[in-house]
Image: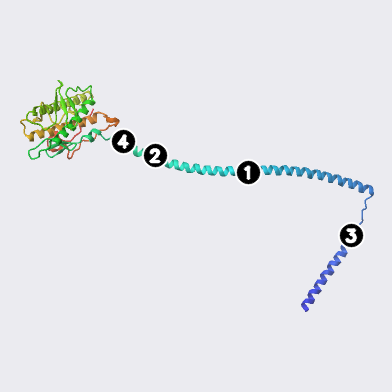
Amino acid sequence: MRVLSDKLDKEVEDVTRDIEAYEACLQRLEGEPRDVLSEADFRKEKLKIEEEERKLEAAIEEIEKQNAAVNAELKELEQKSNRFKELEERYWQEFNNFQFQLIAHQEERDAILAKTEVSQAHLELLKRTNVLNDAFPIWHDGEFGTINNFRLGRLPKIPVEWDEINAAWGQACLLLHTMCQYFRPKFHYRIKIIPLGSYPRIMDSNNNTYELFGPVNLFWSTRYDKAMTLFLTCLKDFAEFANAKDLENNIPPEKCFNLPYKIENDKVENYSITQSFNKQENWTKALKYTLCNLKWALYWFIGSTNFQPLSAMVSSATEVPAVGSLYAKRGSDPKFVARKPATS
């Protein structure tokens, strides 16, 4: 109860002080002099105030017009801002699309460049690849010379089928004919080889044709022997042409092309290529040496020409294989030492 009484006493004191303050203020106001305007001054003051009011109203009206213009301009700017935002959004969309397309094109370009690089490397490999050397691999199989794995010759213990011998002659004829034909008309192709698959023929300078395929019987053996002899003669003519061409290109005589095995009439290194009245061993060896000579002629041709069969460029010569080649079977005989013939 005492706390409540103290609280009420305090509130009474506060109210009393407020009353005293109001009374002091009222007395001060009542004591101030009062300036009462006359009727004329009042009208004059009134007119002045009204004039100021009109000016203020005119100013307000002008400000409202300006405000309206500003609002209109603001609205227009907001519309432009919205359009700019739309344009910016569209720009970034198009920019992102362009970036994606650019990345895709760059990846495609990189892929194309990679393919181009691979293709270029493949092209360079093809340029270094010789078509004739790949098409007519000349090798050996024991006592037999081979071309495209077809054995040329027969032995008493190894009677090679005539179909295989004919195929070997067909390959040899096609190769020699291709090389001779390339140099025409500079090369006087007086003995013509007629490659007809496994049934090749040889035409002499009098246009007499001889069959270079078997099987051969007693009555036909002379024609077969003549065909093989003519093949040797044609190969010798081509070798002499190659030697002369090297000399024309100022190659020293000791480095000019020469066959490793001497050809004289129907003999290769003193082994007759004729089959009649000849041992099969000697005939087979003569054929092997003939293929060896043909291979040397091929390597000279590779190094001296830019042969382009069917528009496929063949530009660089490959090295003569030193191991397992047809040349490497006679040991110390220098004619069998693997080397690349001099090129023009």
Question: Looking at the rendering, which quadrant does residue 288 occupy?
Answer: top left
Would residue 65 appear left or right of 112 to someone viewing this image?
right
Residue type (three-letter) at the residue carrying disc 1:
Ser
C-alpha span from label 1 to label 3? 60 Å
- Label whose residue precedes the other's in the sequence (4 or 2): 2
Percent from the top left, x then y, of residue 312? 29, 32
Give the number of the mark in front: 4 or 1: 1
- Which residue was labeled with disc 4? 124
Give the number of the mark in front: 4 or 3: 4
Question: Looking at the rendering, which quadrant does residue 132 occupy?
Answer: top left
Mark 2 surroundings within 10 Å by alpha-carbon count, few (fewer than 14), some (14 through 19), many (20 or more): few
Image quadrant for the N terminus?
Answer: bottom right
Percent from the top left, x then y, of residue 277? 5, 31
C-alpha span from label 2 to label 3? 102 Å
Mark 1 surroundings within 10 Å by alpha-carbon count, few (fewer than 14), some (14 through 19), many (20 or more): few
Residue type (three-letter) at the residue carrying disc 4:
Glu
Q: Is residue 45 above or below residue 251?
A: below
SS category of the residue bearing label 4:
helix
Mark 3 surroundings within 10 Å by alpha-carbon count, few (fewer than 14), some (14 through 19), many (20 or more): few
Q: Which residue is drawn at 9% across and 33% down?
A: 283
